[in-house]
Image: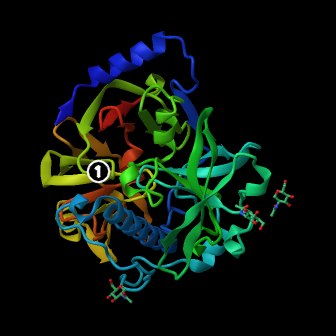
């Protein structure tokens, strides 16, 4: 179902012509960097990719736990269930096709699977490099008291140094498959992103940090989905900022690209896209989830009537294994490579796989479809078959798709929009 984008355009025009009494009427935050799971030599870093799968599965497992606690199991999608904690499994891939490249990855750490920007927390503006995640709803950063070695080299939140810091009751925790977790106490403090400030914002300064975060430049994660999947059961940062009047429009937007990436708070940045924004109504209560989706290969629809969760904090695109198998069956020369990954000949990387929600077809470019080489001749696809427990027909649509579009998230309209990047 469409929402007319003209409604939102009108709202933006109105707020732009009135005097900005408060900050953040359209505030961009630049992202620092982005690279894929592809190494410098063009090969896939399979260990990192497998770690991403485990992390994504456990993130959404925690989201489902939170949703059940906050809203009851009736808030679940058809067929959704809480899966067991996922663990890293590097076996089960065809030899010579996909394999872990541990020896190389030790020396290759410039391999970040996210875009990150700076935020500050506290009266003394403690600075953190943050992954902005539309697929979760909580904020966490390392604590000054973090004892695990994975906190080494990261920015850490010191409660004593901020006069606005308040210790709340409760505990925050996400379990990871390597036996480690991200966990810590619950605090509130002042949080500022690109000049937009939320006071008394719930977050966790974490005492333990999963080993999967060790090699990454980012300090923590700022969730931008709905309050229903918040472990704190509190407003996420952007909702707090909106409720406190720090932004006038409950809209934020992403451009994720090799350069010039940004998150825009309080509207959209018309310098970054052309044409109108195609909006689709959010269904359910927790995720940026839109329905009536289909997957196309060229002019052929290969999977239809799917739900999609648009998740900036997920690198890849995941679909139910049988539907992903159906998709790759339409891609010439493709074959399963284990653990839900597929390969195809590097000489014919598909450039015509698209998602559509009843409007335009939004195509994934060949560059974004290709995660890298598995061998000298075969390349790995960015669409992976995984049952994440999110529901029978639910796809988790991450950066491999988002890089192809300007994406807009509107709490005002409860809609996700896409527009053509300039
Ligand atoms: C690892 O993955 C392979 C292939 O998918 C599977 O056969 C095996 O049971 C898995 N091992 C564990 C411990 O889950
Ligand atoms: C760290 O430890 C100090 C001293 O025990 C305590 O005051 C503070 O609240 C703790 N937490 C953080 C996030 O700084
Ligand atoms: C936290 O800040 C306080 C006050 O500025 C300082 O005395 C203390 O050493 C800091 N603690 C850590 C663990 O950095």
Q: Position of residue 31 (x, y in %)?
A: 58, 42
Q: Is mark 1 within 8 Å of ligand 2?
A: no
Q: Residue at x 74, y 63 (%)?
A: 144
Name the residue carrying label 1: 285
Given residues 81 and 304, the one toward you in this image is 81
Q: How many marks?
A: 1
Q: Quadrant of residue 167?
A: bottom right
Q: Is residue 247 left or right of residue 296?
A: right
Residue 41 position by quadrant: bottom right
> Split into 4 quadrants, where in the image is the N terminus?
top left
> In this view of the protein, can residue 352 be seen by the observer?
no
Q: On the picture, is 163 further left or further right than 246?
A: right
Whether residue 385 appears in this view of the structure is: yes
Q: Position of residue 282 (x, y in %)?
A: 26, 43
Q: Report the side of 391 relative to 264 (left or right).
A: left
Q: Quadrant of the C terminus?
A: top left
Q: Residue 261 placed where, x, y %?
A: 53, 39
Q: Is residue 416 above or below residue 12?
A: below
Q: Quadrant of ligand 1?
A: bottom left
Above or below, 65 against 230 in this view is below
Residue 324 against residue 296 in the figure, above or below: below
Give the quadrant of residue 275.
top left
Q: Secondary structure at mark 1?
A: loop
Nearer to me, 120 or 228: 228
Q: Residue furthest front?
A: 169
* Residue count near mark 1 (Cα–Cα under 10 Å), binned few <14, some 14–19, many ≥20: some
Q: Residue at x 63, y 72 (%)?
A: 208
Check the image and tell me how it is coloured: rainbow
Residue 200 position within the rendered picture, expressed as x and y whole percent measured from the top left: 59, 45
Q: Residue at x 70, y 46 (%)?
A: 164
């Amino acid at each position: 179902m469409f929402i007319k984008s003209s409604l939102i355009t009108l709202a933006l025009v109105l707020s732009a012509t009135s005097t900005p009494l408060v900050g953040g009427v359209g505030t961009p935050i630049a992202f620092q960097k982005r690279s894929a799971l592809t190494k410098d030599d063009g090969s896939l870093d399979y260990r990192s990719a497998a770690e991403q799968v485990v992390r994504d599965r456990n993130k959404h497992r925690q989201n489902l736990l939170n949703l059940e606690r906050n809203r009851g199991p009736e808030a679940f999608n058809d067929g959704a269930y809480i899966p067991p904690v996922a663990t890293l499994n590097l076996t089960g891939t065809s030899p010579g096709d996909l394999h872990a490249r541990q020896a190389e990855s030790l020396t290759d750490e410039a391999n970040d699977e996210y875009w990150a920007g700076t935020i500050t927390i506290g009266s003394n503006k403690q600075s953190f490099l943050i992954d902005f995640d539309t697929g979760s709803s909580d904020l966490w950063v390392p604590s000054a008291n973090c004892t695990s070695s994975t906190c080494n080299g990261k920015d850490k939140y010191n409660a004593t140094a901020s006069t606005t810091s308040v210790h709340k009751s409760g505990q925050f925790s996400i379990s990871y498959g390597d036996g480690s977790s991200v966990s810590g106490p619950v605090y509130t403090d002042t949080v500022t992103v690109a000049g937009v400030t939320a006071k008394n914002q719930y977050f966790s300064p974490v005492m333990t940090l999963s080993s999967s975060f060790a090699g990454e430049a980012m300090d923590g994660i700022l969730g931008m989905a709905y309050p229903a999947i918040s472990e704190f059961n509190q407003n996420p940062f952007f909702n707090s900022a909106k409720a406190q009047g720090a932004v006038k429009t409950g809209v934020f937007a992403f451009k994720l690209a090799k350069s010039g990436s940004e998150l825009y708070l309080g509207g959209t940045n018309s310098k970054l896209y052309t044409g109108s924004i195609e909006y689709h109504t959010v269904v359910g209560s927790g995720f940026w989830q839109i329905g009536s989706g289909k997957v196309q290969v060229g002019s052929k629809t290969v999977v239809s009537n799917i739900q999609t969760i648009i998740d900036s904090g997920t690198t890849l695109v995941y679909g139910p294994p049988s539907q992903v198998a159906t998709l790759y069956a339409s891609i010439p020369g493709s074959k399963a490579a284990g653990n839900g990954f597929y390969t195809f000949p590097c000489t014919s990387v598909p450039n015509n796989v698209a998602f559509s929600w009843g409007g335009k077809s939004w195509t994934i470019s060949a560059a974004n479809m290709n995660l890298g080489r598995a061998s000298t001749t075969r390349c790995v696809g960015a669409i992976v078959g995984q049952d994440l427990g999110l529901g029978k027909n639910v796809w988790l649509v991450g950066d491999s798709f988002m890089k192809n579009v300007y994406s807009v998230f509107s709490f005002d309209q409860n809609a996700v929009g896409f527009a053509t990047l300039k």
